[in-house]
Image (spheres, rainbow, N blue to C red):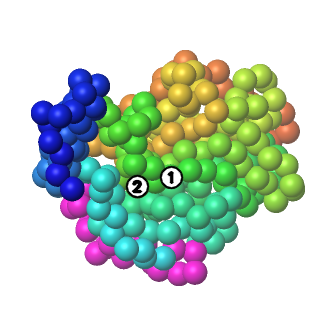
Amino acid sequence: MSVAFGTQSPGRRALTWFGLAAVVLSIAACGRYAYERREQWRSDLESRCMASGAVQMSRYVQRTNAINGPGTCGMDYPLRVAAQARGQVSYDRPQTLACQMIPTVDRWIDNVVQPAAQRWFGAAVVEVKAGSYSCRGIRGGRSGRMSEHAFGNALDVFAFVLNSGHTVVVRQHWRGETAESGFLREIFVRACDHFTTVLGPGSDAFHYDHFHLDLARHDPRWTRRVCRPRPETVQMLQPGSPTGGFGWGFGRQGSVMR
């Protein structure tokens, strides 16, 4: 049914024009999204990781369909990850990650998290409560600069469950002078050896309850890292009754895949 503009009331005409304007803007936005592309280094990094064999498919790690959009969001080879460290450390729910994140998280768990858990608690981490892929900006929503979560290139860690049944929660245990505080601060500072971005409580208002770990490319040569709060400002604690020599394994830093 056609609309005769000349016979409409002023209010109805305004609504009609508003509707047409909304349609035009929507079409323009769709056109803009259609031409948005992820940065090439992201695809290159995923491809090199998949070709290297650094990640093996198993019941813990499985391929899923490529994620393309909206906008630049997504990844070429998304992986659904139920557990890290060869199945020894499960997630509270499966995470969707790009390939390069998986071996990096494994190295952090093997070389930092598990030795620290043994020193501080005489126990092992068996579960991580976390979050991963989300098509959003760094401040939420889809405006402004996109978060590394939008590319499966980041992991948020909220808590660690030990085989003793004890749970260490970032929001609850970061502050203070307890074994939990010492454990969290140690693995936070050492995460800066493995990831290019590490953010935690005190870095800003958005990270008061978790660690943000990612492999963002901060400069063309992959030399710049962002670690906040800065490691030198984090008050480190000593285990009261170490189960092994303090610093065990500290020399074995994992490298970031280039």
- Please say if 218 is above or below 58: above
Quarter residue 148 falls in: top left
Instruction: Check if residue 44 falls in the magenta segment.
Output: yes
- Please say if 129 is above or below 13: below
Q: Amino acid at mark 2?
A: Gly
Q: Amino acid at mark 1?
A: Ser
Highlighted range, magenta: 42-61
Closest to the observer, 209 or 227: 209
Tell me where residue 186 appears, x and y as whole percent: 63, 36
**Cα–Cα gap, marks 1 and 2:** 6 Å
Tell me where residue 128 appears, x and y as whole percent: 66, 54
Query: Is 206 on the left or on the right of 119, as rendered?
Result: left
The numbered disc on residue 132 is 1
Query: Helix, strand, or loop for circle 1?
Result: loop
Q: What residue lies at 77% left-to-right and 36% top-to-bottom?
A: 180
Quarter residue 258 falls in: bottom left
In the rendered picture of this protein, how many numbered marks are placed on residues?
2
Query: Helix, strand, or loop for circle 2?
Result: loop
Marks 1 and 2 close (CB-CB < 8 Å): yes
Q: What residue lies at 69% left-to-right and 45% top-to-bottom?
A: 159
Tell me where residue 192 appears, x and y as whole percent: 47, 38
Q: What residue lies at 61% left-to-right and 50% top-to-bottom?
A: 130
Tell me where residue 233 appears, x and y as whole percent: 55, 18
Closest to the observer, 26 or 83: 26
The answer to whether residue 24 is seen in the rendering is no
Instruction: Check if residue 238 falls in the magenta segment.
Output: no
Q: Which residue is mark 2?
A: 152
Closest to the observer, 192 or 246: 192
Of the image marks 1 and 2, the number of the one nearer the N terminus: 1
Image quarter where the N terminus lies is bottom left
- Please say if 187 is above or below 48: above
